[in-house]
Image (spheres, rainbow, N blue to C red):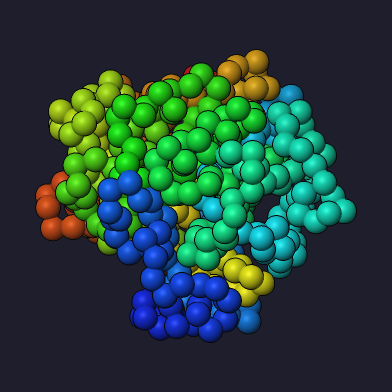
Amino acid sequence: MDRTARRFTLSAAAIVGLLLAVVPGVRAAGGNAGGGLQPPGQAHVLSTITGGPFAAPVGFAPTQIRNVYGFNAMGSDAKGNPIDGRGQIIGVVLWDSDQYLQSDISKFLKTYSYLEAMNGLTAKTPCTVSTTIHTTPCFQVAYATGKKPPAMNKNTMGEASLDAEWAHVTAEGADILFVEAAGDTGPQLLAGVDKAVSMGATVVSMSWDQTGITAADNSHFDVPTAGFVSGSGDFGCPDNSGQVYPSGSSYVLSVGGTSLTIDGTTSSQTTWSNSGGYANTAETRPSYQLNWSTSPYRVDNDVSYNAVDYPVTIQGQWFEQDGVSAGIPQWAGLIADADQARAALGKSVLAASGLLDGIYLAANSHESKPGIIDPAMFTDIKTGSAGSATECKATKGWDWPTGLGTPEAAGLVSELADL
């Protein structure tokens, strides 16, 4: 069932009730269950389950998203291989453990059988992630401390499925390394980030914020071998906490949200009302934002992506999920695609602030006037808002809630490869 079908909308209380009924062990409350900034030192996933359980998928199908953003038109790299992220490792970092994740991914791939199969989802197909090109991509779970976390976090099960399933949609050939941190504190999650990098991840997806992480922790994202993606959301704009990390780091690509509508062969987007956007007063404006932002500080967001109506599997059942968390792993997939194209040309991966330098350069690549977005690289989101403040309204060009806009994957990946 695609987005044109009737959408079921449930209240937060009704969704919690359903989860309690059909997904054993889900708690009715929890600090990391979503719904706004958490107390200092506690993490928060950037997605919310909006409907389900359903007998069949409800929301956008992977092929619809791939068509809207141009992933089906990326072509081949310089060695003649289809661009799909092959030879790259997408690291996904989340806390605690989900024993159903592999079987949920298997159901997702069985349902959308046109997507590339993956090894590592059953005991019959063991594999190890590698930057060596595999015939079949690998899914592997690793533990930040080397030891499996002792408790499954039911509140993040939907996030785990969303991250893993939809990262694969935009980079079907890439390996996925799912790192389970021991808990949701800053040090525990940063240990997960470090683990992903140490195991070869070339891009790391972090679909959470963590109020205990600060600018002092930027060294974890300032590495020469990996790019990092997070987001500012899902509580609207501006975020008045002053600091939100990882997205507030000048070394991390921050993804805002749009709301996508597909009508037959046409589509349109507007700003998602819960998209984030704020000026991080802990960091001065990075050089890549000089021609775009008037704030003296580092400002979220850099880019954006559809944040609504994603089908996910949780313990074998279909749910629908919203949040900038949907765009974070898909942008990580796009970066893996670009890194494959760069590798074919003998170039290094897009890493740390170099990734953001490349993104902003690509946005203005064919224009002589600074601050003009190239439509071959991005769709500029010009309508909607995520808050009442002037900065929180979408405008022509770069803005707080949607950044440079949503990707035109074919043009953007080609441009990033050539930088």
Left or right of residue 255, residue 263 in this image = right
Q: Quadrant of residue 306?
A: bottom left
Residue 64, relative to residue 212: is it above or below? below
Residue 255: give x, y in percent of width and height: 38, 45
Residue 152: give x, y in percent of width and height: 57, 60
Quarter of the image where the N terminus is located: bottom right
Residue 153, relative to residue 170: is it above or below? below
What residue is shown at x 60% (from left), y 17% (from top)? 347
Left or right of residue 409, residue 123 in this image = right
Q: Quadrant of residue 371?
A: top left
The residue at the far right in this view is 124
Which of 176 and 390 lies nearest the eye of the viewer?
176
Residue 340: give x, y in percent of width and height: 64, 29
The residue at the far top in this view is 346
Res 60 visible? no
Residue 241: give x, y in percent of width and height: 19, 47
Left or right of residue 329, residue 244 in this image = left
What residue is shown at x 48% (from left), y 64% (from top)? 155
Left or right of residue 140, residue 28 in this image = left
What residue is shown at x 77% (from left), y 31% (from top)? 133
